[in-house]
Amino acid sequence: MKRRHFLKQSSIAAVGGLLAHHLPLHAGKGIFHPSPRHVVICVVAGLEKSDFEKLFVSTGSKAVLNSGRICEMRYNGAAAGHRMALESILHGEYLAESACGKQSLVESPLLLHPNGKKYLVTSDRVFLKTPGYTEAPGSATHLLVSCVPNQGESPLVKGTKANFSIVSSDNRNVGMASGLRNEIIESNDAYHRRLLFYSEDLLVAETACAILRRESPTVLVSHFMGADVAHGDASQAQTNIRHISTGIQRIWEAVESHPGMKGNTLLVVLPDFGRNGFHNSMVDGNGNYGTDHSISDQNTTHIACLFASNDPHFDLSRIQTRIVQSTDIYSVAQLFLKGKKHFGWPRKDLSEQA
């Protein structure tokens, strides 16, 4: 009797394990309850393909590359504008410039995903000056954060505090913005706090890391602007690209060390678009010419992106040979958050699975 009962229970357990393996991760109904998934997106402004690859050449950043795949990407927006491109990525469709601004970013479908907390971190001062960007909807659960060094002042205050500001888009979260600032200060020594003053990209990354540790967000978008100084200072742009590489590495390390995000997070790194294959007339102090970006140049529209995941249930093997649109990031993020084990290509397949 006991043996028959044992065999019965063993059979049930085996069938249950088999079902859990083949059913979607979000199946629910008492069958399988995985940990919630998370999506972390790093958008780099104006980065051509050869410079994108430089993000993953250092020893530390190779850990990100080893967890993912790089694939070809296209930007087919109506113009090469940073704000428009970022909003198009988060909306999942290419927006006209007239549709951008006001509430269009903070009300993007991805940031209004029904579950969990959503955040966007940027150093772009446009978001502080444009009506709507600093007026998040009262019911929104996300936080738009702008973090900027206080230029013209000493990077260290009394040798202990980095002199920078974090501004929340939602007045309800002013206290949280202050808490993020304190955590960044406490988690970095004097040398690294000094770097934060000189590198807005590292400050964006450290703010993102603090949000990851404190909030375990469902969606976190980090917006890096430093590479775009290549318009007139190509040498500084290369320095900033190294800072961005370090920042992405720090973000991935924060994910991997977070018990609630390790094993169930998707990281996406992409430029909003690239840069022209020809230089402009601006020359920096080292004699290097600057480059602009325009959709008439293939170097601007033909770029690359990286998908990385520490989720053993999510298959990245089908990505590397495919060409994606920058607006596909929205669909990929939604499918991942819904518990899909893989996603098909091209975009038609994404829509069918959404």
Image (cartoon, rainbow, N blue to C red):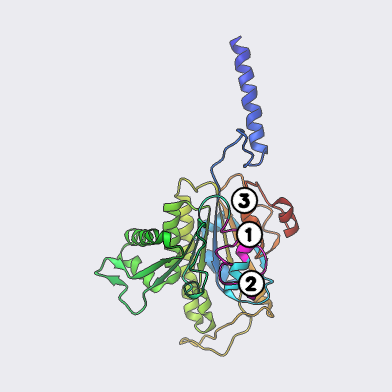
Callout 2–callout 1 Cβ contact below 8 Å: no
- Residue 47 visible here: no
* Front position among marks 2 and 1: 2
Residue 302, how many percent across, how many down? 67, 71
Q: Is residue 151 above or below residue 214?
A: below
Residue for point 71% across, 53% down: 344
Q: Marks 2 and 1, Cα distance to the nearest angstrom? A: 18 Å
| Dot placed on the residue nearer the N-terminal end, 1 or 3 | 1
Amino acid type assigned to the residue bearing label 2 in the image: Ala
Instruction: Say which of 283 and 84 sits in front.
Output: 84
Amino acid type assigned to the residue bearing label 3 in the image: Phe
Q: Secondary structure at mark 1?
A: helix
Q: Quadrant of residue 162?
A: bottom left
Amino acid type assigned to the residue bearing label 1 in the image: Tyr
Q: Which residue is the site of mark 2? A: 99
Residue 212 within the magenta-colored segment of the rendering = no
Q: Which residue is the site of mark 1? A: 330
User: Does residue 47 appear to the left or right of 73 in the view shown?
Assistant: left
Disc 1 crowd, CA 10 A, few/some/many (<14, 14-19, 20+): some
Q: Marks 1 and 3, Cα distance to the nearest angstrom? A: 10 Å
Residue 217, how many percent across, how many down? 49, 53
Instruction: Say which of 144 and 353 sits in front.
Output: 144
Please report the bounds of the magenta region as a residue range: 89-112
Residue 2, how many percent across, how many down? 58, 11
Q: Which mark is residue 336?
A: 3
Residue for point 53% across, 52% down: 218
User: Does residue 97 appear to the left or right of 141 in the view shown?
Assistant: right
| Dot placed on the residue nearer the N-terminal end, 2 or 3 | 2
**Residue at the front extreme?**
138
Quarter of the image that includes the N terminus: top right
